[in-house]
């Protein structure tokens, strides 16, 4: 048969004929301590238990397979890896496929815990946002696509969210986070140890669940009865908390977002974020963006947090001074510079070294324009400049006149 990895989902229903055949063809059956508790209840367990090997952790499982196949005597050994539910839904199947190639993998899926959870509470899930904050058994290697603080954003967007948790990112923390943003408006379901003998459902308002302890593993479902109709784009200055006069004006904000040519996902730095108007509207427009709002002023940081909470926005607030703080951030795809603190060239140098495809900055002074243009060209960027001078209508005793805003230069640079 040759070297083959059979990835078998278990948990909620009897093994299929193909899954039983995979087990019988496997010289080794790898499982975690937790899954062994489930697998030992299957009728097939007695006939294969002498081939079962306990390994906790995805990395340890991968290393075991590598070592096994590097040994000449076991190079062609077929083996099975037991997985919880559907191995390709936030499961080990993805990693095994990446490490050993799709041609080496054969998958027998089980129902996912999310399918079971929604069935138990009798709720449809085709309109839910599904996410995982499960970081695995090694906190030091934890790389989560989503964090608990992202849940309010997706709940305000979809009205129904299902979360795969872990002991650190647990239902109590989720309840506390939801209460901070929504009060007791959402309704929560915590479905503990699905597929085990001690399976349990706990439900209630966030404040009721904040101080409870929950058993692992568990799934959390949150439902928001009344969705708001906050605009995704087009917030006015009066709708964003800010320090008087210190905000990227509506017209400039619209042009900046256009010039950034933002992808549907990726990393954006908003440097000199101020009250966060750019981060806020980017977040509302693009759910899968990861946005870092960098700001040093304490008053502005308070406003950043206030606007984030008010609109359930999804951006990460980075207190600190650029460019020093930038070295701690992941490399960006797009960068907006709204303020340079008198260190424009130093800041541009740090940003360019980070390698964004597009950067956009706004300046009011001709001196800054004359500094930025030649510098960006010298660094090989294709540069575009727009001067924006908007006129807004003002009421004058029942009649309108146009009042000019301060002119702003919007400079965009694209890496050649």
Image (cartoon, rainbow, N blue to C red):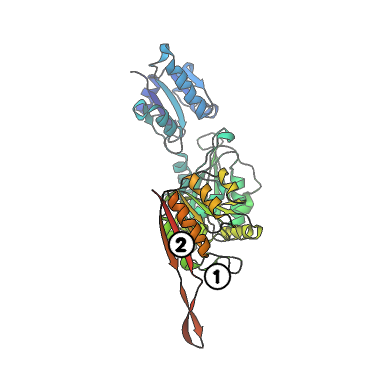
> What residue would you read off at disc 2?
410
**Residue 225 in the image, given as x and y percentages of width and height:** 51, 59
Identify the image quadrant of the N terminus.
top left
Gap in angstroms between the C-alphas marked 2 and 1 = 22 Å
Residue 325 seen in the figure: yes
- The vertical placement of 104 against 376, above or below, is above
In the depicted view, which residue is nearer to us: 28 or 14? 28
In the rendering, at what x and y percent does residue 72 appear?
A: 41, 12
Residue placed at 40% from the left, 26% from the top? 100
> Residue 255 falls in which quadrant of the image?
bottom left
Which is more toward the observer, 307 or 109?
A: 307
Can I make out residue 263 in this image? Answer: no
Contact (CB < 8 A) between labels 2 and 1? Answer: no
Look at the picture and state if 197 lies above or below 377.
above
Q: Position of residue 104 (x, y in %)?
A: 36, 25
Q: Position of residue 49 (x, y in %)?
A: 48, 19
402 relative position to 327: left or right: left
Circle 1 packing at 10 Å, graded few (<14), some (14-19), many (20+), is few
Q: Nearer the viewer, residue 399 or 132?
A: 399
Secondary structure, mark 2, is strand
**Residue 238 tag number:** 1
Q: How dense is the environment of label 2, judged by Cα within 10 Å: few (below 14), some, or many (20 and up)?
A: many
State the residue in front, 316 or 181: 316
**Residue depicted at 45% across the width and 52% down the height:** 376
Q: Secondary structure at mark 1?
A: helix
């Amino acid at each position: 048969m040759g070297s083959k990895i059979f990835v078998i989902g278990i948990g909620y229903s009897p093994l299929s004929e193909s899954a039983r055949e995979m087990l019988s063809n496997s010289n080794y059956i790898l499982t975690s301590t937790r899954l062994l508790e489930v697998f030992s209840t299957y009728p097939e367990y007695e006939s294969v238990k002498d081939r079962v090997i306990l390994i906790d952790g995805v990395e340890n499982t991968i290393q075991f397979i590598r070592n096994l196949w590097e040994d000449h005597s076991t190079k062609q050994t077929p083996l099975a890896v037991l997985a919880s539910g559907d191995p390709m839904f936030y499961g080990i199947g993805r990693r095994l496929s990446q490490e050993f190639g799709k041609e080496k993998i054969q998958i027998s899926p089980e129902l996912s815990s999310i399918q079971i959870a929604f069935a138990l509470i009798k709720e449809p899930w085709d309109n839910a946002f599904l996410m995982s904050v499960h970081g695995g058994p090694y906190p030091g290697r934890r790389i989560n696509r989503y964090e608990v603080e992202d849940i309010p954003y997706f709940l305000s967007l979809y009205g129904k969210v299902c979360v795969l948790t872990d002991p650190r990112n647990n239902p109590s923390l989720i309840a506390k986070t939801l209460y901070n943003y929504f009060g007791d408006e959402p309704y929560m379901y915590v479905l503990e140890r699905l597929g085990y003998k001690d399976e349990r459902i706990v439900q209630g308002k966030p404040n009721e669940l904040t101080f409870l302890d929950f058993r692992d593993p568990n799934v959390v479902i949150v439902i928001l009865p009344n969705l708001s109709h906050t605009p995704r784009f087009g917030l006015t200055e009066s709708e964003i908390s800010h320090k008087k006069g210190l905000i990227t004006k509506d017209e400039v904000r619209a042009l900046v977002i256009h010039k950034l040519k933002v992808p549907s996902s990726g990393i954006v730095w908003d440097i000199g974020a101020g009250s966060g108007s750019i981060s806020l509207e980017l977040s509302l427009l693009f759910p899968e963006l990861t946005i870092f709002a960098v700001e040093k002023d304490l008053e502005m940081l308070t406003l950043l947090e206030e606007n984030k909470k008010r609109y359930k926005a999804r951006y990460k607030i980075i207190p600190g001074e650029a460019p020093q703080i930038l070295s701690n951030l992941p490399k960006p795809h797009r960068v907006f510079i709204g303020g340079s603190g008198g260190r424009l060239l130093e800041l541009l140098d740090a940003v360019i070294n980070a390698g964004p495809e597009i950067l956009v900055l706004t300046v009011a002074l001709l001196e800054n324009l004359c500094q930025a243009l030649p510098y960006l060209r010298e660094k090989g960027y294709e540069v575009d400049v727009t001067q924006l001078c908007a006129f807004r209508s003002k009421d004058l005793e029942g009649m309108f006149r146009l009042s000019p805003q301060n002119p702003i230069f919007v400079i965009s640079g694209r890496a050649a």
